[in-house]
Image (tube, rainbow, N blue to C red):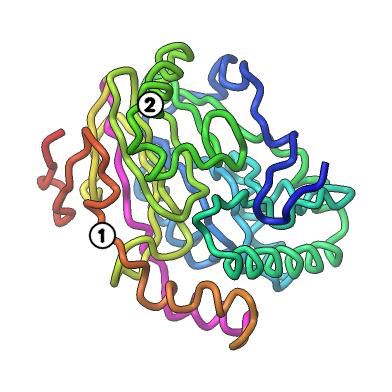
Amino acid sequence: MNLRPGRDCPLDYRLAADAFAGPALFDCDSLYVVGGLYGNRQALVALERLLAGEPGARAVFNGDAHWFDRDPALFSLIEQQLRRHLALRGNVETELGREQDSGAGCGCAYPETVGEQTVDWSNAIHQALSDTLQTIPGLAGELARRPACAVVSVAGQRVAISHGDERSLAGWQCAREALQDAGRRAQLNAWLAEQRIAVLATSHTCVPAALQLPAGVLINNGAAGMPVFAGARHGLLSRIARTPHPLALYRAAYAGLFVEALPLVYDHAAFLTEFDRQWPPHSPAARAYRSRLLDGPADLPNSALLGGFQLCQPTSAQDVCSS
């Protein structure tokens, strides 16, 4: 099979029909889903601070924990910290973990609406990370052994976690554009009901999306390790919990759960210094991402809300928006 690097998915990206049918790996009252950390060490520090303030909370990293961390020491440090949590594979980890090149490049499976220049930059970043991994013996195998998806329980409700969507590790069917289609909504609602899933948490697209359906909730955090909204120098987390969080940007209530998007506010100056050290001007990552790291994309939180979610005013513990 001849793949277009960055455009096409290898066959092994497909998730089995029963991928989410098993028992939950654990139960907790509060869950943070961290998609797209992208090698941002400062964002990881900020996450640990959030977890420390919420005893008993658990975190799942649902792929693409690496991207900007081409420095082997930084890559290894992030890996050491991930071992405290459940870490899944995204397309980044999947392609870095292969013994032989699949021909998929970065494995992003970009839709045709994404320009060729973006695809080329992503493939170049992936190649730089592949070179980094060659200097860290044994780590590729560790990445390859990570599961592609998981089911956990929050307050007794089943939560499915995938990097892309419910069918593919790098699927784009939980992107905002796809979820605006009535047929896709009906398909996802039927899947949630059949699988007895209250919440499906995804990432991959770098653009957040949130949708409540009759049978369950979809929340896509977009990216934890870089800005997702205009003028906001923070990433975004998905939080699923028995109780609401005072810092939520938006939320929905479903089956006794609060499903929320939380800002992940990291040391932006330190992160940018670390980024520039690894990716000088005219490097593929600098060209593709530096302006976004400074100013965010041209997007606002209300653009992520596709139905059933409400914006919040995250100022105090008493400030809880209606669902």
Q: Secondary structure at mark 1?
A: loop
Of marks 1 and 2, which one's residue comes earlier in the chain?
A: 2
Q: Is residue 80 magenta?
A: no
Q: Position of residue 56 (x, y in %)?
A: 42, 36
Asked if 211 appears above or below 274 in the picture, the reply is above
Q: Nearer the viewer, residue 235 or 188?
A: 188
- Amino acid tagged 1: Leu
Please rate how many residues cluster around mark 1, counting C-alpha atoms within 10 Å: few if below 14, some from 14 to 19, many from 20: some
| Range of residues picked out in magenta | 256-279
- Amino acid tagged 2: Gly
Q: Secondary structure at mark 2?
A: helix
Please rate how many residues cluster around mark 2, counting C-alpha atoms within 10 Å: few if below 14, some from 14 to 19, many from 20: few
Asked if 135 appears above or below 215 in the picture, the reply is below
Q: Residue at x 25, y 59 (%)?
A: 300
How many numbered discs?
2
From the viewer's perspective, is 147 left or right of 28? right
Q: Nearer the viewer, residue 45 or 140?
A: 140
Q: Is residue 270 magenta?
A: yes
Furthest-bottom residue in view? Answer: 281
Q: Residue at x 21, y 33 (%)?
A: 308
Q: Position of residue 173 (x, y in %)?
A: 48, 37
Q: Are marks 1 and 2 in contact (CB under 8 Å)?
A: no
Q: Residue at x 40, y 13 (%)?
A: 193
Q: Position of residue 92 (x, y in %)?
A: 67, 53
Q: Which residue corresponds to mark 2?
A: 183
Q: Which residue corresponds to mark 1?
A: 300
**Quadrant for the N terminus in the image:** top right
- The quadrant holding residue 76 is bottom right
Q: Residue at x 46, y 11 (%)?
A: 194
Q: Position of residue 267 (x, y in %)?
A: 42, 73
Disc number lying in front (1 or 2)? 2
**Quadrant for the C terminus in the image:** top left
